[in-house]
Image (spheres, rainbow, N blue to C red):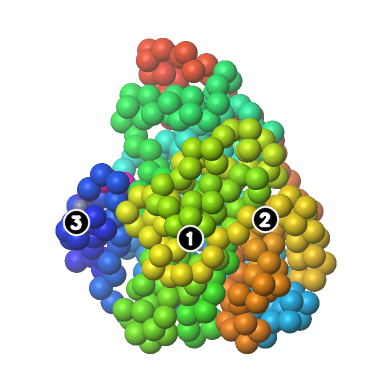
């Protein structure tokens, strides 16, 4: 007996005992997990202490989010109940994510869920933090993964020593969509599925675990939740978890307002939400806008915004606001946060800090309300002082690679692993 079932947001159908962490039921709508039992936080260690995860018998260790009540940033902003969900490396506080971002949770839950569904390996078509997280978890969970990245993203990619043996391919002659295309062909030929993106319930539940830790710590749902969004997966995951808390009944009866932020001038979701439009506007997706932002992890041109159960629906259900944060505000916020709280941030986290500062200035959040600020990544500098990190050394392939060549490549990559 499983402790969860899966429901389609489109037609409401409940799916039982099916392998569907990755599948699609109704086109253009997301599946969500329904957990039968009330919330528990005493089921294991690290992230596995929570029962609201789509896994049964975890086979490896995975540290979770650290939530603490801010003293210095809170005082600076004149707030009384500011909680920080820190996702990264900060051993002094017990934060032990060696890949330094909350992407580690999606990788951990997706891999454990895949193991339990007898999937034999995964293809990950991504870059940056997601690629690093999956490479790390592939080693920790001893589960085969092939990482495919566009060459232009290699610059900002680093691995832990152990991850350097995870097969990583860089598509040398194309952009992000070409690398996804190559990954798709590798998936078809190898028979290994894609990690699934936002459609994968395990991914959203993994990212939603930040609010599980927050409620466990605070004892109730926060009034407001702040996060920088790229694909929107993390924000959707938090909304879904909040709905579960409301059904549980012990932690409050009002969904937290969502305050989701992007980096100006690339802010497609901000503009669409300002107009209350379910569709993104084409002119907001121009690639030249992406060149001007300082947070590439927030630059996806295909966010889970319009899809049923996506960011638009989350904003409509929760209320709140979306924010555009300038590069200047990003750097000021980085500086401010690390000076006040004493830990370095990845730039994307500073986008959320910038949004919080804007909302305080505008009086959107009240001084005594309970606010959860999701620091999605941090402690890279701290980690760099303690551990060696490496530039990723991929095998380069062309987007023109033939099926025969892919077949050979997959064979050698998986054997070597
Ligand atoms: C991916 C990422 C985000 C955005 O998360 P989404 O789920 O894609 O919206 C924010 N911050 C960091 C550090 C990330 O790696
Ligand atoms: Zn359906």
Left or right: residue 100 compared with residue 301:
right
Residue plotted at (31% across, 43% down) = 119
Dot 1 or dot 2: first in sequence order is 1
Separation of residues labelled 1 and 3 (CA atoms): 22 Å
Q: Mark 2 points at which residue?
A: 325
Residue plotted at (19% across, 56% down) = 11
Q: Give the range drawn in magenta.
A: 21-25
Left or right: residue 106 compared with residue 165:
left
Q: Residues within 10 Å of mark 2 (few under 14, many from 20)?
A: many
Q: Could you tell me what secondary structure mostly forms the magenta stretch? A: loop
Dot 1 or dot 3: first in sequence order is 3
Left or right: residue 88 compared with residue 78:
left
Q: Name the residue under label 1.
A: 235
Q: Does the residue labelled 1 lie within 8 Å of ligand 1?
A: yes
Q: Is disc 1 in contact with disc 3, using a CB cutoff of under 8 Å?
A: no
Q: Mark 3 points at which residue?
A: 11
Q: Is mark 3 within 8 Å of ligand 2?
A: yes
Given the current orientation, which residue lies at the most extreme front position? 275
């Amino acid at each position: 007996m499983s402790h969860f079932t899966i429901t389609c947001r489109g037609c409401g159908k409940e799916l039982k005992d099916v392998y569907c962490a990755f599948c699609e039921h109704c086109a253009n709508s997301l599946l969500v997990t329904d957990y039968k039992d009330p919330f528990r936080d005493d089921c294991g260690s690290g992230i596995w202490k929570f029962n609201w995860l789509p896994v049964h018998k975890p086979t490896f260790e995975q540290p979770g989010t650290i939530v603490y009540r801010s003293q210095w940033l809170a005082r600076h902003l004149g707030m009384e109940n500011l909680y920080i969900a820190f996702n990264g490396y900060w051993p002094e506080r017990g934060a032990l994510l060696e890949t330094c971002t909350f992407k580690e949770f999606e990788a951990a839950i997706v891999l454990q869920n895949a193991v339990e569904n007898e999937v034999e390996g995964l293809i990950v078509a991504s870059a940056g933090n997601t690629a690093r997280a999956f490479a790390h978890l592939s080693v920790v969970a001893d589960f085969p993964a092939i990482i495919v990245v566009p060459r232009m993203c290699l610059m900002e990619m680093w691995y832990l020593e152990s991850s350097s043996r995870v097969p990583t391919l860089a598509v040398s002659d194309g952009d992000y969509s070409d690398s996804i295309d190559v990954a798709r062909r590798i998936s078809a030929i190898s028979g290994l599925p894609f990690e699934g993106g936002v459609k994968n319930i395990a991914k959203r539940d993994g990212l939603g675990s930040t609010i599980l830790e927050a409620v466990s710590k605070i004892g109730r749902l926060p009034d407001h939740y702040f996060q920088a969004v790229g694909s929107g997966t993390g924000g959707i995951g938090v909304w879904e978890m909040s709905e579960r808390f409301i059904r549980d009944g012990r932690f409050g009866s009002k969904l937290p307002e969502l305050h989701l932020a992007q980096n100006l001038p690339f802010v497609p979701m901000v503009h669409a939400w300002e107009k209350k439009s379910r569709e993104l506007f084409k002119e907001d997706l121009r690639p030249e806008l992406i060149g001007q932002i300082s947070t590439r992890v927030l630059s996806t041109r295909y966010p889970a915004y319009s899809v049923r159960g996506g960011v638009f629906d989350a904003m409509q259900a929760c209320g709140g606001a979306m924010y555009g944060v300038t590069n200047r505000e990003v750097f000021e916020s980085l500086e401010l946060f690390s000076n006040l709280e004493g830990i370095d941030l990845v730039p994307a986290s500073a986008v959320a800090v910038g949004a919080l500062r804007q909302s305080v200035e505008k009086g959107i959040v009240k001084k005594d309300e309970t606010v959860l600020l999701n620091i999605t990544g941090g402690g890279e500098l701290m980690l760099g002082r303690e551990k060696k990190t490496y530039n990723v050394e991929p095998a380069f392939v062309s987007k023109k690679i033939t099926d025969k060549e892919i077949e050979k490549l997959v064979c050698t990559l998986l054997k070597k692993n």
